[in-house]
Image (tube, rainbow, N blue to C red):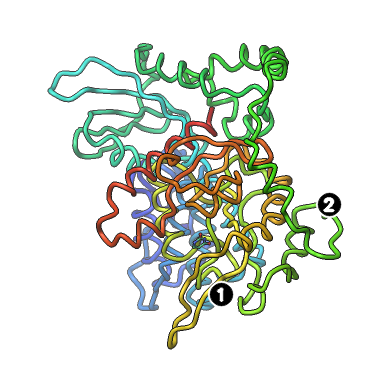
Amino acid sequence: MIRIDLPRFERFEAWRQAARHLAGARVPSSQVIWADHDAAPDLFGAEPLPPPGNAPVSATRDFLDLARTVSFHSSPERWTLLYEALTRLQRERRFLKNPADPFVARLETLAKAVRRDIHKMHAFVRFHEVPSEGPRRAFAAWFEPEHLILEAAAPFFAKRFSDMDWLIATPDGVAHFDGALQFSDPVARPELPTDASHELWQIYFANIFNPARIKVQAMRSEMPIKYWKNLPEARLIPDMLADAPRRVRAMNEAGASNAPAYAAKVTARIRVPRQIAEPRSLPEARDQAAACTACDLCHDATQTVWGHGPVDAVLMIVGEAPGDQEDLKGRPLIGPAGQLLRTAMAEVGLDPEAAWLTNAVKHFKFTVRGKHRLHQNPTAGEIQTCQWWLDLERRFIQPRLTLALGASAAYSLTGNPSPLRGRRGKIEYARDGGPVLITWHPSMILRQKGQGAAARRELLEDLAHARAIILA
Ligand code: URA
């Protein structure tokens, strides 16, 4: 057997180099032991690495991205799986494109767990201010991820907190930042002081907590209990949950903050697509929407573009209507505006895959100019006709917060047709009573061609606000 010892940091790069060498020498997976830095030494001695072979070895970008993600998983078998994937890729270039292949599904499951863990780390690291020896303020945090994700998660903090010195200690190593990001071996869990920034978190959290809308199950899955001990604001949770029924009663007695009167008018105007029985599930609603002919947009569009995301998403994001690419692929917000949104979400630590992304109108509206299909804004009537579907999505998803991108989404959700200036960044209430945070549509930022920096900053601010609300 050939044993490959992998280092604690830059493991993926080390694996990649060794895997390329072994695959080039046509060494079968059964002949290789991949040993993590903390694996026991091999008592029986291992064979030396064979000389490089001449078999050509190449990897696709998709494979490398997936392999890098999987490499952060804590499962000891991941290296063998990746080596098997690399050797299979030499024979079958497209096998990763088949999600029904059990081997691909296994890799995707590992990658998904890693992505989720990185998302949790971005959301739940809480820094404590510590005495600084230099001109910059210094912060430290302790975090216990499920997987070996420190190297994958740390660049986010380096970008976000580039003007301070910080370190994040985990049981598997420490990330340090002082203008440059570095990693070192683990240390014992440090004693971290409580400080003013923690009090601020607690005050903020207590203020945005709405006792009438708690979904304890969703809260536990979004903010698993194991993270609570390191979150200053989580100390408030048991008391606030215990007090929630009393606060809901008090809110009811005081009169709930219902959606304003124009919302009722809009609700009365919603047209129910003809001959439709109330669907009993989200997939049933999606199938019905696929055949919707309630307005004329269905005639020219390729397909109904239904929402996308997990059914238990706590955040719903509503755009205006699908564009050219969305119409062709059948997925919302994947074109240029969607890309801008997804990048901005990632910058503030929101996982686009964890949100339900959808549109106020489910069919592409366009005019043809030469070879191009140019987007057109839907009319108020088209938005109202499509509200039936958006309302169904909302009923099944029950998001804790909805982000309205632009005026059409804001109108569809709240019934308020006023321009966005003055409303952006504020919470309004949907016709069903749920909170809606209003923000700019990313295509408005794209249209400003390089002049949209201020609007982009505001979009980021609103996304960060949304993140704080859904994590509360
Ligand atoms: N713009 C939107 O509002 N939604 C999409 O899905 C794409 C572009």
Q: Position of residue 327 (x, y in %)?
A: 57, 72
In front here: 51 or 276? 276
**Is residue 89 depicted above or below 119 in this figure?**
below
The local secondary structure at tag 2 comes to loop
The local secondary structure at tag 1 comes to helix
**Residue at figure coordinates x 36%, y 15% from the top left:** 192
**Is residue 55 depicted above or below 199 in this figure?**
below
Q: Which mark is residue 356?
A: none
| Horizontal relation, residue 425 to residue 248: left or right | left
**Residue at figure coordinates x 34%, y 55% from the top left:** 13
In front here: 296 or 401? 296
- Say if disc 2 is inside 8 Å of ligand 1: no
Q: Does the rendering let one see residue 254?
A: yes
Query: Badge 1 local density, few (<14 within 10 Å), some, or many (20+)?
Result: some
Amino acid on which the number 2 mark rests in the picture = Arg
Q: Position of residue 349 (x, y in %)?
A: 43, 41
Q: Quadrant of residue 158?
A: top left
Residue that mark 1 sits on = 328
| Horizontal relation, residue 379 to residue 275: left or right | left
Tell me which label, 1 or 2, sits earlier in the chain. Answer: 2
Residue that mark 2 sits on = 280
Q: Position of residue 310 (x, y in %)?
A: 64, 49
**Residue at figure coordinates x 32%, y 44% from the top left:** 457
Q: CA distance from mark 1 to mark 2?
A: 28 Å
In front here: 353 or 144? 353
| Horizontal relation, residue 170 to residue 401: left or right | left
Query: Badge 2 local density, few (<14 within 10 Å), some, or many (20+)?
Result: few
Q: Position of residue 97 (x, y in %)?
A: 56, 71
Amino acid on which the number 1 mark rests in the picture = Leu
Position of the C terminus, as image quadrant, is top right
Q: Quadrant of residue 380?
A: bottom right
